Amino acid sequence: MQKYSTKQRRALLDYLKDHADETLTVDDISRALSSDGVSRSAIYRNLSALESNGAIKRVTRNGTKKIFYQFSGCDDCHGHLHLSCTKCGKTFHMDLAATETLAHDVLRESDFELDKGNTVLYGICSDCK
């Protein structure tokens, strides 16, 4: 991130932190922050900067060309696999013990080490079943 922090960047980052379990489009973010005076161009500019420093990640979903963004700077993300609902878009952290078991099994069976913080498993959440 750049060495300075603008009011618009703080508002964007606070919003993303408050919605860390969601993947959001620029339209979603713009609607939410328009009353705070955050312009669409500031959103794009700041998303780019925040993505460059790893505070957020860009997410795509099968079946859509939309780009989604999600806050990834929280400590809870590190070391956890992520579960993402293909219906509602909500993202969950997999239990740490289950994450470790799955990562260990993949390594043992395939000699492949998962990047746990960046791995997303897609399916349907309990609310959408």
Image: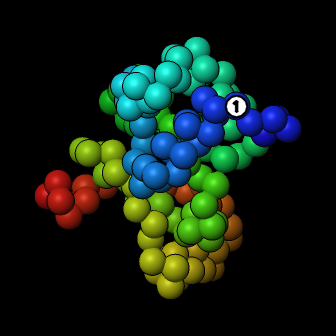
In this view of the protein, which residue sits in the foreground, 3 or 88? 3
Q: Position of residue 116 (x, y in %)?
A: 61, 64
Q: Position of residue 107 (x, y in %)?
A: 64, 74
Q: Which residue type does callout 1 highlight?
A: Thr
Above-or-below relation of 72 to 45: below
55 to the left or right of 60: right
Q: Position of residue 128 (x, y in %)?
A: 17, 54
32 to the left or right of 124: right
The image quarter in which residue 103 lies: bottom right
The image quarter in which residue 110 lies: bottom right
Above-or-below relation of 35 to 58: above
Residue at 68% across / 67% down in the picture? 113
Residue at 46% across / 28% down in the picture? 36
Above-or-below relation of 112 to 41: below
Q: Position of residue 90 (x, y in %)?
A: 34, 51
In this view of the protein, which residue sits in the foreground, 41 or 90? 41
Q: Secondary structure at mark 1?
A: loop
Mark 1, residue position: 6
Residue at 46% across / 34% down in the picture? 68
23 to the left or right of 104: left
